[in-house]
Image (tube, rainbow, N blue to C red):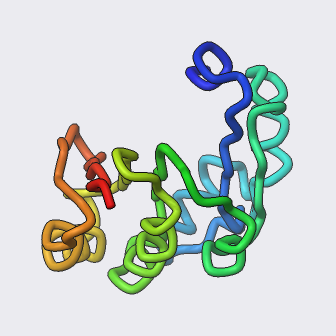
């Protein structure tokens, strides 16, 4: 909505395999809330249409390592809601940080919820010379990319 209102030429790259993978408890939760669906791509597109955002998004139904080459540099915001293990979230953020322009924001979901996300934030992101911790609100933590 903010893109439509303030920057109508902006596109939002949505990278997700849409496969509902995770731990056994996460997969059980996903199946319960999606009534047994094993993927959510078509529902994502349907919701984007219903909400009027379809023309602003570029959905990439794959992993970040595959989609990385399709995403241009100069992003103003990267919101990472990755796998929740240390390696998964670390891989995703290391792929996207170079794409963020100086002054842009890297935001992560599930801080304080999953050990792997917290480990990556504490061991890596808080010590990354390219980033400055901006704020944490509930389970979302934001870093600003320092000018280069």
Position of residue 128 relative to residue 58, above or below, is: below
111 relative position to 103: left or right: left
Q: Which quarter of the figure is the N terminus placed in?
A: top right
Q: What residue appears at the point 39 percent right and 86 percent down from the top-left corner?
A: 87
Position of residue 8 relative to residue 128, above or below, is: above
* Residue 38, image x, y percentages: 75, 65
Q: Which quarter of the figure is the C terminus placed in?
A: bottom left
26 relative position to 106: left or right: right
33 relative position to 138: left or right: right
* Residue 80, image x, y percentages: 46, 58
Position of residue 112 relative to residue 19, above or below, is: above
Foreground residue among 53 and 44: 53
Foreground residue among 102 and 50: 102
Res 85 quadrant in image: bottom left
Give the number of marks: 0
Foreground residue among 85 and 10: 10
* Residue 105, image x, y percentages: 37, 47
Foreground residue among 134 and 109: 134
Extreme residue toward the front, this view: 148
Q: What residue appears at the point 39 percent right and 71 percent down from the top-left corner?
A: 84
Q: What residue appears at the point 42 percent right and 70 percent down from the top-left corner?
A: 93
Q: What residue appears at the point 26 percent right and 59 percent down from the top-left corner?
A: 113
119 relative position to 12: left or right: left
Extreme residue toward the top, this view: 5
């Amino acid at each position: 909505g903010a893109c439509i209102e303030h920057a109508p030429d902006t596109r939002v790259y949505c990278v997700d395999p849409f496969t509902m993978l995770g731990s056994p408890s996460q997969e059980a939760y996903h199946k319960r809330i999606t009534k047994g669906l094993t993927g959510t791509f078509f529902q994502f597109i349907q919701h984007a249409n219903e909400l009027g955002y379809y023309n602003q998004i570029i959905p990439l139904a794959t992993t970040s390592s595959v989609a990385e080459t399709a995403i241009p540099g100069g992003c103003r915001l990267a919101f990472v809601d990755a796998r929740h293990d240390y390696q998964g979230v670390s891989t995703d953020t290391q792929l996207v940080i170079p794409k963020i322009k100086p002054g842009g924001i890297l935001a992560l979901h599930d801080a304080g919820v999953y050990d792997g996300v917290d480990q990556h934030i504490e061991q890596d992101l808080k010590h990354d010379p390219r980033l400055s911790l901006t704020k944490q609100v509930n389970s979302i933590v934001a870093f600003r990319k320092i000018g280069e």
